[in-house]
Amino acid sequence: MASVWITVQNWFESRLPLSDSVTLTQRTVYILPTRAGLMLGLTLLVLLIASINYQLNLGYLLTFLLAGCALVGMHVCHATLRGLAMTLIAPNARQARATAIIKVKLTNERRSPRHGIGLRVLNPLDANGKKNSERNWAWTDVPAQGSSVVQVAFTPTRRGLHRLPTLIAETRFPLGTFRVWSVWRPAAHMLVYPAPEAMPPPLPAGEPRAAGASAAARAQNSGEFDGIRAYRRGDPMKLVIWKKAVNAMNASQQTAGYDSGLLVRDAQQTQRHELWLDFMQAGTFDTEKKLSRLCAWVLRADTLGLDYGLRLPALQIRPASGEAHKRRCLEALALC
């Protein structure tokens, strides 16, 4: 039974148009009674039968009064979504198995506010790629002739360039007796980086530059690249790796002429060596685990402010540093 339902749902989703902006109309908004609505209908039926049987005028009055309120609530509930405009705000790249945020702008052009509108991913998945029973709704009210931004969370499970998941908008305002919903398939894609390895090994040793191969220095196993060392009194402040220093400033201590909280670039070593993050040297694991290790190394080298290059089977990125270089390397890993 579950497989049949999944097949029907996939068929329904495939028939929906792809669009990053949609206005909900009469044809795209659906309505059904909730459990509370069904119980209300059963109660009204019992009241009506009892009123007919015992000829109770007040019973007729109560029955038709409640029925009228339910009908007005149905109209108001359907009108809460009908005519609402939803626009997708382009998402940023995220890492696999990390929470990503989809921002949706809701625009209301009518002169009355819309209350109790919720959005969520239609088929949420957990970090292991299995269907998640928890439905994380994001609720908001949209003011009259105004707009509101909703942030919908989901967890991408695989690296690469993927289309955003199908979204569902729903409301049960005002009485909760009817459920009104609409399904939306965004056309935008999202780049998902590999998940970094939790406990990666130290950065690989630097490779001698072509011009200084005869003066190759020894590799160190200290867990840091050869081009950095601990701060010594008298070192120029321009050589300090400030990204690392900010995190260690509170724990800095003076010991044997070194400041344990600061690291500096070793100009002599940096001139002779280059840090290359090579796919072939990332262990003997499968491709995904190698990419996870390379991702962790890229983040580590960027945190230390190092110049680093990336070698992949079909691509080579020359050593550099900075935010743009880090994004380029992570994009290469995501699309490898």
Image (tube, rainbow, N blue to C red):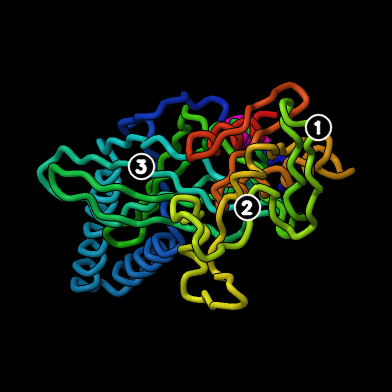
10 magenta-colored: yes
Q: In the rendered image of this protein, does residue 239 appear above or below residue 323?
A: below
Percent position (x, y) of residue 115?
Answer: 25, 55
**Residue 56, position as x, y percentages in the image:** 23, 73
Q: Nearer the viewer, residue 289 or 175?
A: 289
Which quadrant of the figure has residue 298? top right
Q: Give the SS element for disc 3.
A: strand
Label placed on residue 214: 1
Magenta range: 7-12
Residue type pointed to by label 1: Ser
Under mark 2, the amino acid is Ile
Residue depth check, mark 1 versus mark 2: number of the one nearer the observer: 1
| Residue occupying the far right of the picture | 284
Q: Which residue is mark 2?
A: 228
Q: Indicate the position of residue 301 as horizontal and vertical percent values.
A: 62, 47
Q: Is residue 261 left or right of residue 217?
A: left
Helix, strand or loop at label 2? It is strand
Q: Which residue is mark 3?
A: 104
Can you see residue 162?
A: no
